[in-house]
Amino acid sequence: MPRYLPRILLAIPLVVAALWLGAPAAPAQDAPPETAAAVEIDPALTRPGIDLGDLELRLIPLTQDELKALADDWLSIVKAKTEEVIDQQIILNHGEAADEEAARGRLATLTEERNRLFERFSVVLDGWQKKGATSETILPYRTYRNSVIIEEKRTAGWETLAIEALNWLTRRDGGVRLAVRAATLVGALVVLLTLARIVRRIVGRAIGRIPNLSKLLQSFILMVIYWLVIAFGLMIVLSMLGIDITPVFALIGGASFIMAFALQDTLGNLAAGIMIMINRPFDEGDYVDIGGVAGTVKAVSIVSTTVTTPDNQVIVVPNSKVWGNVITNVTASATRRVDLTFGISYEDSIEAAQGVLERLVAAHPLVLRDPAPVIRVNELGDSSVNFVVRPWARSADYWTVYWDLLRQVKLAFDEAGISIPYPQTEMHLRVPAAATAGSAAASFPPAPAAPPAPAAPPARGRPAGAPDYAAGDEGHDPEDDDR
C-alpha cells in the first residue's frame, strides 16, 4: 500500500482538473423562449369551391396546429357567409325587396352556399379530431354550426323553407347524392346476400367432407360465415359511401357491455349451445331423453334445442337446461338390445317354452345374429317362471322387433298350450278344531236376557234340588197340546 500512495496522490489532482476542464460552461442567462412561428395554410384549402374528396386528402399530411389554424380560417369563412344570409333575411322581413320572389330565391341560394361551406368546415373538424384534438376543443366550433342552422330554420318562413328543400332535393350534392347512396346501399345489400349464400354453399360442401363433424357444428359454422360476410361487406360499402363507421364500433362496444348484464340467461344458453356443438352429445335426427323430455331432435340453435315428441308435440328447451341435465341418446349407437320378459306357469315345461322362444327369435328377419340373442330363465317369480329374451337389432328396427316378438310369443304359447299366468295369491287357513268351536261361539253375540219374573212361593212337595222356575218357563206351551 505505501508504494502505491505517491501514484494515488498524483492522480487525484489530474482527475479534478480533467473534470473541471471538461465541464460545460453555465449559460450566463436563460435563453429567451422561441416564438411560435405563424402557421401558413395553403390557400387551396380555404377555397370555397374545393371538392370534399380533395379536401379530405389534403388534410392527411397536416399537423394538429395546422388543422387548428385551418379550422379558424373556415370559421371566418362560414361566419361571413352567414352574415350575408342574415342580411338577406332581414331585407325579406322588412319588405324592402322590390321582387319578393327573387329575394327569396336569393336567400335560398345564399343558404345553400353557406351549407356547402359548413360541410367543408365539418370535414376540417373531423380531420382535426382524428389527429388528436379533444372533444372539448372542437365543441365550440360544432356548437356554432348547429346553433346557426337551428336559428335560421326557426326564424325562416315556410316559403323559404320550401324553396330550400326543393333546391336541396335537386342539388347534385344534396338529394341526388342521397338517392344515389340509398340505391347503392340497397344494391350492395342484394349483392351481399347473394354473395353470402354462395360462400355458405361453398363452405358447406367443403366442411361436409370432414369426418366426424356433427350437423349441429356444421350449421353453426355456416351461420357464422354467412353473417360475417354480410357484416364485413356492409362495413366496406359504408366506408365507400363516405360514412364513418368508427362510432358504430364504439356503440357496439358500449351496448355489448350493457347487454352482458341484461342478457345473462341468454348468454348462458349461448355458452351451453357452443358446448353442445363442440362435444356433440347428440345430433339432428337423434332420439334423446333430456331431463324428462323425450323426442327426436329437429333443430339446435345457438340458444335452444327443438325436440319433437312421438305424438308430434314440438318442445323448445333452452340450451342451459339441456347441458345442465342428464342427456340420454337413444339412437347414438347403430344397434340396440331389445329386452323382453315372458312368464310361464309353474306347471308348464321350461324346455318347451325355451324352444318356442329360440325358434321365434331365430326366425325373425330383423334380429341380428351377432351379437347372439340371449334367452334364459331369469326368475322364479311369485306367480310365474320368467324368461328374459334379449335379441339385438338395428336402432331403426328396435320397435318393430319389440312388437313383433310380443305378438308372436303370445300366439306360439297359445298354440303350444303354454299358459302365461297373471299374478295371483292362494291363501290356506289351518285352524285346530277346539279353536274353531271357540271361535264359532265367540263369533255370535249372546241373546239378551229376559226380564226376571216375580218369584212364586215354593210348591209343597217339591223335591229338594228341583229347579226354581214357574210353570211355562221350561219352554213348553200348554196351548200346543190343545192343537
Image (spheres, grey):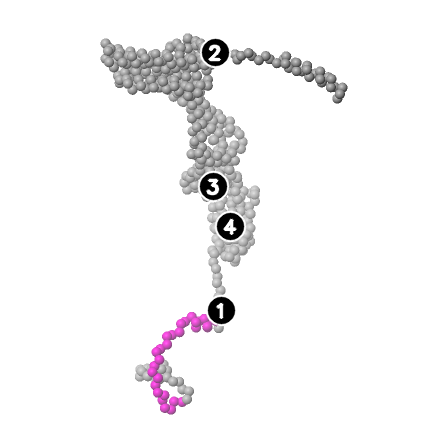
Q: Residues within 10 Å of mark 3 (few under 14, many from 20)?
A: some
Q: Residues within 10 Å of mark 1 (few under 14, many from 20)?
A: few
Q: Which mark is residue 431?
A: 1
From the top left corner, tell me how far across and down residue 93 is, in percent: 25, 15
Q: Nearer the viewer, mark 3 or mark 2?
A: 2
Query: What residue lies at 47% left-to-right and 50% top-to-bottom?
Result: 411
Q: Which mark is residue 310?
A: none
Q: Secondary structure at mark 1?
A: loop
User: Is residue 113 visible in this depiction of the protein?
Assistant: no
Give the residue type that dot 1 points to. Val
Give the residue type that dot 3 points to. Ile
From the top left corner, tell me how far across and down residue 66 is, in percent: 45, 13
Q: Identify the magenta region.
A: 435-463
The mark that comes first in sequence, 2 or 4, is: 2
Above or below, 351 relative to 453: above
Q: Nearer the viewer, mark 4 or mark 3?
A: 3
Instruction: Using the numbered discs, state the Cα–Cα distance from disc 2 to disc 4 in whole angstroms.
Output: 105 Å
Location of the N terminus by quadrant is top right
Q: Residues within 10 Å of mark 2 (few under 14, many from 20)?
A: few
Q: Nearer the viewer, mark 4 or mark 1?
A: 1
Q: Which mark is residue 341?
A: 4
Side of 346 where 51 appears, left or right:
left
For disc 2, the marked residue is: 35
Give the residue type that dot 4 points to. Thr
Query: What residue lies at 42% left-to-right and 24% top-to-bottom?
Result: 248
